[in-house]
Amino acid sequence: MMPMDERLEREIEELLGLREERIKDSELYKVFSEVFDKTTLETLEYFHRRGKIEEISGVISTGKEANVFRGIDRDGKQVAIKVYRTYTTEFRRIWEYLAADPRVGYLPKDMRKLVFIWTRMEFKNLQRAIKYAVRAPEPVAFRNNVLIMEFIGDELPAPRLKDVERTLRREDFEELYSFTIRAIERLWKRGDMVHGDLSEYNILLWDSPVIIDWSQATVKRNKMSRSLLYRDLRNIITYFGRKGVGVDDLEEKFRELAGE
């Protein structure tokens, strides 16, 4: 990580809500100091000045590609803040997805700029999904490698389907299967779009199910779209079939949607 100057360090302490009563070696501070570079901190500072992020209060999830944090905006509303790592081991995968997407033009060789495009694409994918009546987090703003969106949850973040599956009844799984299949169909038929990474790990259970992680979603015109559609269907049909749900035949469902 690039060393922070004193101004940025004070700014990030304010964002994190670090006061005298909160020690500087808190777990949240460690996540920031170990992972984020100067570009990320400057981007967070930019959003802080504009009231989009008043304080960052916790970690929702961490991964190889991005971390998601819980924050509060100037109006006291909770938000989710997704921060992509500007230097990631996922470079080849990101490049391959963007190169195949007809919505993307020239691809820079600089990894940071590539991640900026990846962040912008997730913002636009969220907008497109919501436009076609698929429940996803409402996007708020993006800049560089930071994406701000609706926080799904209350006092705690909404759980993933995978995390609470043992508490669900068969009827619950049947309803969730219907919801997910309808979302796949609506995206493909009405939105000319596919999620591309749909599974029990990317469905949050809240007042209604919410589909998350839209970074690699793409449009039908992408030469990879049919294989991604097949993968989404396979993941969902296989998972819910194991839970005792009467599921569609994978090959028939794919032919029905893909027109083959």
Image (cartoon, helix red, strand yellow):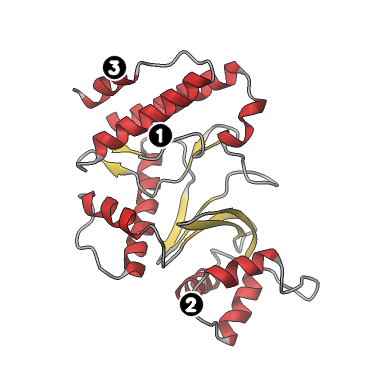
Q: Which mark is residue 38?
A: 2
Q: Residue furthest top?
A: 246
10 Å neighbourhood of mark 3: few (<14), some, or many (≥20)?
few
Which mark's residue is nearer the viewer, 1 or 2? Answer: 2
Q: Residue furthest bottom?
A: 6
Q: Quadrant of residue 180?
A: top left
Q: Is residue 103 left or right of residue 37?
A: left
Residue 139 image position (x, y, % from top left):
45, 51
Q: Which residue is mark 1?
A: 133
Residue at the spot 49% in from the left edge and 22% down from the top edge? 240
Residue 81 image position (x, y, % from top left):
53, 58
10 Å neighbourhood of mark 1: few (<14), some, or many (≥20)?
few
Image marks 1 and 3: residues in contact by CB distance under 8 Å: no
Q: Amino acid at mark 2?
A: Lys
Q: Amino acid at mark 3?
A: Glu
Mark found first going from the N terminus, 2 or 3: 2
Task: Look at the numbered disc 3 and give the secondary structure of its residue.
Answer: helix
Residue 248 image position (x, y, % from top left):
38, 16
